Amino acid sequence: LAKTTQPISMDSYEGQEVNITCSHNNIATNDYITWYQQFPSQGPRFIIQGYKTKVTNEVASLFIPADRKSSTLSLPRVSLSDTAVYYCLVGDARGRDDKIIFGKGTRLHILP
Amino acid sequence: GAVVSQHPSWVICKSGTSVKIECRSLDFQATTMFWYRQFPKQSLMLMATSNEGSKATYEQGVEKDKFLINHASLTLSTLTVTSAHPEDSSFYICSARNDRGSGYTFGSGTRLTVV
């Protein structure tokens, strides 16, 4: 499984756009990139998944450059409720990996 | 869709007793489930991989006799913390492979406090 590297923490203000970048230099051809959000005392929640270029859903966008060695999660107009830990995972989207290993994640703190 | 139900959400037990945590896939079959432990301000640490009908595979350093995992059906996996001690106090989370394209769905977690 590809190892990922993310900033440990980030601060931003309400209404701003937040971009969290994840490095995954050893990503394999069949790997997808998936981002999860975790609030305190809750399990991780799926946010978005992509393979290349750009993916957008109702809560976020995911930008993936052509070499796929990194990805950027973009949260538009964040609110206080977006304060959470965000994890970037790389692996087979269909769940065919033997196991999934979490990196340290990015602790995002939204300020009023 | 692809919901994983984990119970209980929190439990307090006395040192030396055993605690069972259940993880159920509600609307899909989960041949493989994963159990994680998370300490405060830290990431999820994989404890074991649970496969339906076979023995679980434990990560290095995880005591299989202390953390008993049973995956007897395609929708249920259980983790039993045997002879719990205060150092076992943690947040335990299960996850299951889903068939909905996103790969994995997580339970809501169980906060275990051993006193």
Image: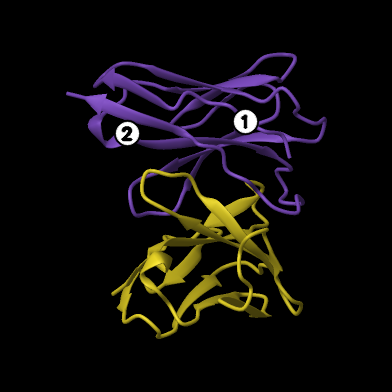
Nearer mark to the viewer, of 1 and 2? 1
Residue B88: quarter of image: bottom left
Left or right, residue B15 beside residue A61: left
Q: Residue at x 50, y 81 (%)?
A: B82
Q: Which of marks 1 and 2 is nearer the N terminus?
A: 1
Q: What residue type is labelled 2?
A: Asp
Q: What residue type is labelled 1?
A: Thr
Q: Which residue is drawn at 38% across and 21% down?
A: A76
Which chain does the residue under circle 1 lie in? A
Q: Which mark is residue A4?
A: 1
Chain A representation colour = purple
The quadrant of the picture occupied by the N terminus of chain A is: top right
> Local crowd at mark 2 within 10 Å, few (<14), some, or many (≥20)?
some
- Choose between B115 and B57: the one closer to the eye: B115
Which chain does the residue under circle 2 lie in? A
Q: Mark 2 points at which residue?
A: A82
Element type at mark 2: helix
Left or right, residue B58 beside residue A81: right
Chain B representation colour = yellow
Left or right, residue A82 beside residue B57: left
